[in-house]
Amino acid sequence: MAGIIAAVMQTLVVPLLGELPALLHTSGSNASWVVTATLLAAAVTTPVAGRLGDLYGKRRMLLISTVPLIAGSVLCAVAGSVAPMIIGRGLQGMGMGILPLGISALRDLLPAERLGPSIAMVSASMGIGGAVGLPVAAAVAQHANWRVLFWVAAGLSLLIAILIYVVVPDVPVLAKGRFDVVGAIGLGVGLICLLIGISKGASWGWDNGGIIGLLVAAVLALALWGWWELRTRDPLVDLRVTARPKVLLTNASSMVLGFGMYSASLIIPQLLQLPRATGYGLGQSMLAMGLWMAPGGLMMMLVSPLGAKLSAARGPKVTLVAGALVLAAGYASSTVLMGSTWGLLVAVCVCNCGVALAYGAMPALIMSAVPLSETAAANSFNTLMRSIGTSFSAAVIGAVLAQMSTSLGGHAIPSESGFRTGLFIGCGVALASAAIAAFIPVKGDEASGRSTIGAKAVGA
């Protein structure tokens, strides 16, 4: 439930994006920070929350992570200008570490035979939340005061805090050492510079001095961070463990898959909502678009148990490769089916089936290759890699759609060839993710049909 609500937080403001400048009495460029703030806060705090979970207890950090979710939702609900709204959205982003923390806690709490299906279901919760959250948020925004959205978010965040307190047991902490404050600051600076540079490059201009400065600063900060992590006794992220082929290739495949997965989220909603007068737009309202997208998220819930069975039989590497290939097939079908709402519905369902398979396999691969004392930190870092992939996707697909545009009523809109190009890019990137995953090394127990996340990993 926490994963579903975290996903709802991400889609909460989508129906309001066009109205935010008027609602908050600000410019469109300032209002865009309402989305960017959540992305930045989630990227910076997720690996921190993971390491703190390993050091001080995952249940404790799960509870702490609900505090900024509640506070941020309340602040957004009462905001009358853009500054408190940005701060509130940043606080909501700080709570996004709940998902990798929750997946990591499963390794401590569940018997081996229940771990695989549970990981798959919790991973799929992000898709379920997105599927439910978008049409509900659109309906509320269309028929009620927009502040209701954030009051509901605050109530849901309080509910998951109570449920975590009542339902989730605590387990002994195995990790030793101190929290790496310098490493957290270094990673935060590097990520902020990188993600602002990527997310604002298209609007500010890639040759803008500020963008170039941010990207150069990101490279320098992350290089210094890596140097520090390799030399400190208790690193925020153990880069030696991260460099193991199994972990390294899983993270690389995850980042590329994050790019591929997010491309559909950028393209298909626009196709559904553009006016029919374009010749390729389908003229749907925001609410109708959300309802057409919703079955894709529900497919994730249905497919995730099948992914767990495939991982148990063939190993999570096979599931990850299969998921990336299914995602590529979804993109390929969308280039043919993009002329109708039902066609895009089918394409979205196929894409999300692939995402469900892949997202359930990634934590299984990571947890089978890292020590029990580093589970949360490693899972959080994997989540970060996916987030970086989605940021690159937004920049690349946004640039493609901006360059390949046409004019309608005096406004520039993406052309049909631009959308097709974006879909082909998504297909190619998904195939690249499958190719990377194919090189992930496996042990003999996976090859014989037993997942390494079984008794060996949990019994440790």
Image: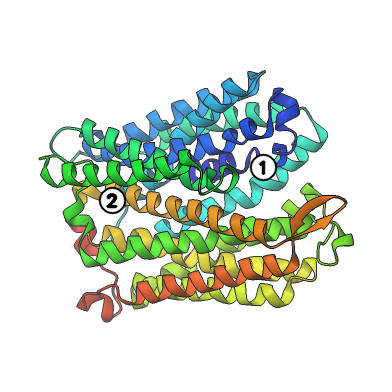
Q: Out of 429 and 220, give the one closest to the viewer.
A: 220
Q: Is residue 442 above or below residue 299?
A: below
Residue 169: in sight, yes or no?
A: no
Q: In this view, does 418 lie to the left or right of 95?
A: right
- The residues bearing labels 1 and 2 have C-alpha atoms spaced at a distance of 30 Å
Residue at the location (59% across, 25% down)? 85
First in sequence: mark 1 or mark 2? 1
Image color mode: rainbow
Going by the numbered disc 1, the residue's amino acid type is: Val
Q: Residues within 10 Å of mark 1 (few under 14, many from 20)?
A: some
Quick one: SS at disc 2? helix
Going by the numbered disc 2, the residue's amino acid type is: Ala
Q: Residue 378 carries which label?
A: 2
Point out residue 101 in the picture as x, y percentages from the top left corner: 36, 43
Q: Out of 266 and 296, give the one closest to the viewer.
A: 266
Q: In this view, does 229 lie to the left or right of 85?
A: left
Q: Is residue 247 above or below residue 346?
A: above
Residue at the location (50% across, 54% down)? 390
Q: Residues within 10 Å of mark 2 (few under 14, many from 20)?
A: many
Q: Out of 30 and 328, give the one closest to the viewer.
A: 30
Point out residue 199 in the picture as x, y percentages from the top left corner: 52, 45
Point out residue 46 in the picture as x, y percentages from the top left corner: 37, 40
State the residue position of label 1: 14
Q: Do the residues labelled 1 and 2 touch (CB within 8 Å)?
A: no
Q: Out of 389 and 374, give the one closest to the viewer.
A: 389
For the C terminus, which image quadrant?
bottom left
Quick one: SS at disc 1? helix
Residue at the location (34% across, 33% down)? 61
